[in-house]
Image: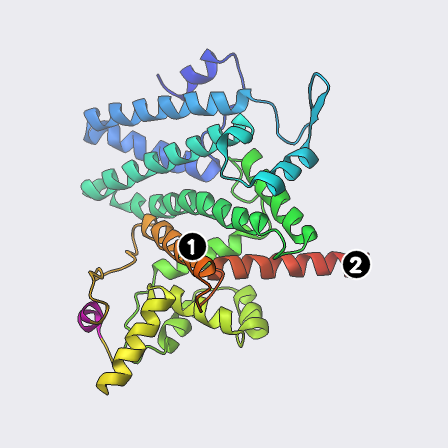
């Protein structure tokens, strides 16, 4: 079953598995794969068929942006935001089904492009497509991860203003509704850009000052990043979150390494000595530049440690760098609107 068959099967419903860039790349790659490895080509077609089924289910649900009447109840964007404020975003049975189907679709699409990336790496004749596939693979993973950052902001009742949390909720709802549009949100690209840049650098540790990593990271980012550092770079929490981000280890580990260096009277460390200081296994390449899943794991490791810090009342950053950056961008947007009005 190919994409045309799927479209015919569901009676002409508008299904968009790919954007224009993805479609062009997919067409070229599949045409080449059909000649190189017919069996792998058949697997590719089967995976696309399954994606089409998920897309059909997603598109069959009503828009979460429209008002829905269920007897005496009216479900709207406002009632959904109220639910997010009250219950949070992790309670799957309390969210519209379309939200969960859409996330499942994105995970499946991410796995499909991961499969295509492995195929490109396997056959030299497909190597020319590997870089593009990599970028698309990363974007799909980061689109899932940005949802997690928005959710944290929404659920911080009493920490952020209702106005800022509502803005984050509206952005998240649009992400949920427009799964196929890579440019639907205004703020997400800056955070995605940060993750993509981080994948390209590997910490060298050295003096544990992070200056080299910060310079390398900044050289890959846009002007928004410089505005962020200019306004918040002296903030202690920002500095601590940035240290975690550039070194690839959590705040407590950064502190332990520095204390050990001072106690032993040494000025530099490498990855091998870092392993010994932390008394644990630290991968030689903690965040692989070719695997965005490492960034996903790294974000959630920092998030879990933040929760433990808050519960225990321990010193250290109470937010990830991604959350701080996203809040900074949303706040500036809200301030700009007030100025214009």
Secondary structure mostly seen in the magenta stretch: helix
Give the number of the mark in front: 2 or 1: 1
At which x and y percent is residue 297? 34, 51
Q: Is residue 188 left or right of residue 116?
A: right
Which quadrant does the C terminus fall into? bottom right
At which x and y percent is residue 197? 40, 60
Which residue is depicted at the point 30% across and 58% down?
Answer: 287
Q: Quadrant of residue 269?
A: bottom left
Q: Is residue 157 left or right of residue 39?
A: right
At which x and y percent is residue 278? 23, 68
Count of marks overlaid on the render: 2
The residues colored magenta run 270-276
Q: 5 above or below 74?
A: above
Which residue is depicted at the point 22% across and 28% down?
Answer: 40
Q: Quadrant of residue 224?
A: bottom right
At which x and y percent is residue 238? 50, 69
Q: Which residue is mark 2?
A: 340
Q: Secondary structure at mark 2?
A: helix
In this picture the colour scheme is rainbow
- Residue 23's label in the rendered image is none
Q: Which residue is mark 1?
A: 303
């Amino acid at each position: 079953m190919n994409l045309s068959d799927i479209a015919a099967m569901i009676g002409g419903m508008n299904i968009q598995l790919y954007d224009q860039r993805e479609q062009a790349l997919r067409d070229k790659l599949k045409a080449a794969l059909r000649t190189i490895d017919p069996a792998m080509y058949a697997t590719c077609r089967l995976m696309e068929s399954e994606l089409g089924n998920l897309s059909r289910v997603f598109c069959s649900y009503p828009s979460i942006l429209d008002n829905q009447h269920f007897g005496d109840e009216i479900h709207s964007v406002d009632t959904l935001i109220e639910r997010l404020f009250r219950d949070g975003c992790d309670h799957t049975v309390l969210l519209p089904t379309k939200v969960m189907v859409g996330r499942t679709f994105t995970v499946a699409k991410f796995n499909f492009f991961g499969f295509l990336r492995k195929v490109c790496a396997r056959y030299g004749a497909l190597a020319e497509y590997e870089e593009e596939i990599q970028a698309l693979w990363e974007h799909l993973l980061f689109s899932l991860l940005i949802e997690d950052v928005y959710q944290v902001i929404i659920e911080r009742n009493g920490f952020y203003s209702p106005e800022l949390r509502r803005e984050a909720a509206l952005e998240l709802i649009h992400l949920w509704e427009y799964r196929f549009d890579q440019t639907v949100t205004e703020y997400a690209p800056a955070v995605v850009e940060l993750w993509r840049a981080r994948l390209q650098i590997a910490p060298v540790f050295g003096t544990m000052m992070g200056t080299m990593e910060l310079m390398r990271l900044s050289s890959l980012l846009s002007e928004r990043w410089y505005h962020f550092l200019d306004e918040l770079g002296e903030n202690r929490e920002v500095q601590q979150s940035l240290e975690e981000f550039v070194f690839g280890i959590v705040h407590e580990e950064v502190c332990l390494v520095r204390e050990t260096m001072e106690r032993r009277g040494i000025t530099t460390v490498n990855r091998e000595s870092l392993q010994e200081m932390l008394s644990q296994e630290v991968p030689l390449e903690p965040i692989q530049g070719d695997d965005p899943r490492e960034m996903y794991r790294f974000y959630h490791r920092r998030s879990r440690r933040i929760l433990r810090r808050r519960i225990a009342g321990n010193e250290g950053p109470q937010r990830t760098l991604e959350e701080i950056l996203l809040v900074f961008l949303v706040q500036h947007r809200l301030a700009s609107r007030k100025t214009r009005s």
